[in-house]
Amino acid sequence: MELSQEKVKHVKEWLDKHWTGDHNCPICKSNVWQIVGMVYEIARFTTEPTTAKTVFPIVNIVCQTCAYTMSFNALVIGVVEQQQKQEPVAVPQPHVAANTDARIEERQKQEPVAGGKP
Ligand SMILES: [Zn+2]
């Protein structure tokens, strides 16, 4: 999910408020960071055979010198609504719609079902 300029600004303000101490990269000691204007998701690893997966949204900031990346929970920062979180966090259900990406769900709906109606 792309972050609007307003939400990128919110992330910056959140970091300014919560990131105390120096802002040096733990790898290269640079202090030039960039907020990535996207929300990514981290999925829970499982060996269970399931179409559902548990994910949580994250926002990344990247060191502009060495590319070290820090991740922050987008829900805690407040750039993803609780409702948006619950949608992708699928509980095991028999139908395939337990997908983590609404765009994928839309695409699946549009795809013809094999052996379906002519
Ligand atoms: Zn660095």
Image (cartoon, rainbow, N blue to C red):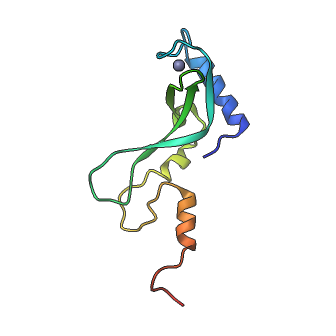
Looking at the image, residue 47 sits to the left or right of residue 52; the answer is left
Whole-percent x, y for residue 108 in the image: 52, 68
Q: How many marks?
A: 0
Extreme residue toward the bottom, this view: 118
Looking at the image, residue 62 sits to the left or right of residue 95; the answer is right
The quarter of the displayed image where residue 103 is located? bottom right
Residue at (48%, 49%) from the top-left corner?
86
Looking at the image, residue 1 sits to the left or right of residue 113; the answer is right
Residue at (48%, 52%) from the top-left corner?
88
Vertical relation: 45 (above or below) 115:
above
Residue sitting nearer the eye, 18 or 29: 29
Whole-percent x, y for residue 118 in the image: 54, 90
Looking at the image, residue 23 sits to the left or right of residue 53; the answer is right
Residue at (51%, 28%) from the top-left corner?
69
Extreme residue toward the front, this view: 66
Vertical relation: 22 (above or below) 111:
above
Residue sitting nearer the eye, 63 or 53: 63
Extreme residue toward the top, this view: 21
Residue sitting nearer the eye, 63 or 115: 63
Vertical relation: 82 (above or below) 49:
above
Whole-percent x, y for residue 91 in the image: 38, 55
Whole-percent x, y for residue 58 in the image: 51, 37
Extreme residue toward the right, this view: 5
The quarter of the displayed image where residue 34 is located? top right
Residue at (72%, 36%) from the top-left corner?
5
